[in-house]
Amino acid sequence: GSTAGMDRRSQMFLTGGLFRRVDYGLQGGLVVDYLHDDWFYKADLLQLRGELSFVTAYRGEWGFRFTNSQQTSESTISIGGSSIDLSLESLDSYRFFARRNFGIHLQSTAELVAGWSEQKNALVGLRIELPLAAELGLEAESLYGTPPSESMLGYDQEWWNIAIALKWTPGRSFGTARDYYRPLFKVADNASLLVQRLTP
């Protein structure tokens, strides 16, 4: 909670698109991400998210990922009895990444991310996936976006996300590296869809 609103917040993310996986060479895809955010405001946002990478013979991978806002959400909020117009959209970002499968049967994955945003934030992140059982795995992810150096209110333009999740893959071993039908993209979350407030 905060002085601005309630102590509860609900978000719904949806992702859909196309991708191509390979054993060696170029792979990539493009998806559309949707976010419904219900807090002291209500927002519906869309973005495009794309990725192109080169898979090496040793299961290493080097690539580039981008996000591009497709929809702005307008709402009116009330703070301290005053009405304020609020405009939100997703933040355009550009990220290079290095990803590698490792461990027994290459079922574990580690990914390092570094990039920037349209607001001149520097972005750094780390994601790790580890198998816990045949169809169960653990995912841990973090992302930090530094505020622009010229920003007067750094905290207002700073992003960070830490997430830990259990993942269940019924009917398929967790982290199977050569599964061509395993989605290349995760469902959007607060690390891949960053929300910014537009100033008048």
Image: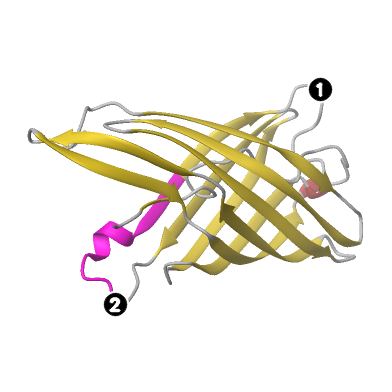
- The residue that appears at 43% across and 72% down in the rendered structure is 120
The region drawn magenta spans: 150-162
Marks 1/2: CA–CA distance = 51 Å
The colour scheme is secondary structure
- The residue that appears at 76% across and 61% down in the rendered structure is 52
Quadrant location of the C terminus in the rendered image: bottom left
The spot of residue 96 in percent (x, y) is: 63, 68
- Residue type at numbered disc 2: Glu
Residue linked to disc 2? 150
The spot of residue 73 in percent (x, y) is: 42, 40
- The residue that appears at 65% across and 42% down in the rendered structure is 32
The spot of residue 151 in percent (x, y) is: 27, 71
Residue linked to disc 1? 171
The spot of residue 115 in percent (x, y) is: 54, 69
Secondary element at image label 2: loop
Secondary element at image label 1: loop
